[in-house]
Amino acid sequence: MNPKDDKRTGLTSSPVSVHNPHLDELKDDVLYHFSLGTRTHNLPAMFGDVKFVCVGGSPWRMKSFTEYIAAELSMEDPKAEYPNICAGTDRYAMYKVGPVLSVSHGMGIPSIAIMLHELIKLLHYAHCTDVTIVRIGTSGGIGLEPGTVVVTKQSMDATFLPKFEQVILGKTVVRNTDLDEGLAEELFQCSRELNQFKTVVGKTMCTQDFYEGQARLDGAFCSYSEQDKQDYLNKAREAGICNIEMESSVFAAMCKLSGLRAAVVCVTLLDRLKGDQLNVSHEVLHSYQQRPQILVGYYIKKQLKALRS
């Protein structure tokens, strides 16, 4: 689907694209894991004003982000109770304040992929345009001080290649994992304006697993040595990889297909070259986890201010 011209303003708007002709045949598309549907809910009325979507693994974290952004934008009482729009299911949580939608995606590629299929359809059915989506989360750093925020410019697989592979009808389909360079640069500039914590732009490795897939030595199974681990992580570092997580590749691929301007902003909780387990206090971890939301919140506030001026 191509960008559309708004006859009233003369500006070009970018809709959220779906690429599935079978959807036209559905009388009611049930977004099962959101407990929403095209017949049972007025999606344009509920979500038509959404311009920013922030997604993250934890339901608690995404509710916290909603409360934070509400206070930042001075839109609603930050002490108000924000209802979970997806309360009819226990799979994901969704919150909304003004033009900002906050959605949890669980852990790992399969979980975020299911969520994204339904989120993209929701935004499409709601006739949303010019949507920016950001994944905020945590990661393991490679050669970075804990607490460093990484803005991903490209997601790499566990062999250090920029691709996402999926088997469809028994055949391997390879999709691009580039993220929006302009958006990454804008977020990096915001971090410089904030000047509160170190931020870098780099490549992120997305793995299928938290333990062996990330060369950890503390899983239930391990068939390699400490030296093997160090060699692998150093090769990743030489390939330009700054951090490791488990969702960025499919996130980048699906957002690119749907025309969504997308970014991944993750804080590093530890340097994987120095260990596998977290050994800092809960208070320090909490302060680290707030950094992506501070950066993204600042970006959203700045963008909305620019739109109003």
Image (cartoon, rainbow, N blue to C red):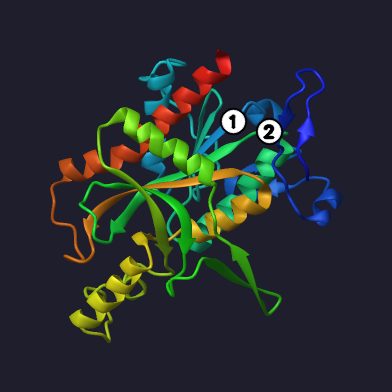
Residue at the image position 17 percent from the left and 43 percent from the top: 284
Quadrant in the rendering for residue 65 = top left
The location of residue 293, given as percent across then percent down, is 37, 36
Specify the quadrant that holds the C terminus. top right
Report how far apart the C-alphas of labels 1 and 2 lie in the structure.
7 Å
Which residue is denoted by mark 2 in the rendering?
Answer: 129
Q: Secondary structure at mark 2?
A: loop
Which residue is denoted by mark 1 in the rendering?
Answer: 51
Residue 37, can we see it? no
* In the displayed structure image, the side of residue 203 where residue 109 appears, left or right: right
Marks 1 and 2, the one that precedes in the sequence:
1
Specify the quadrant that holds the N terminus. top right
Contact? badges 1 and 2 (CB < 8 Å): no
In depth, the one of 6 and 48 nearer the eye is 6
Numbered circle sitting on residue 291 = none
* In the displayed structure image, the side of residue 187 where residue 35 appears, left or right: right
Amino acid carrying mark 2 in the image: Thr
Amino acid carrying mark 1 in the image: Lys
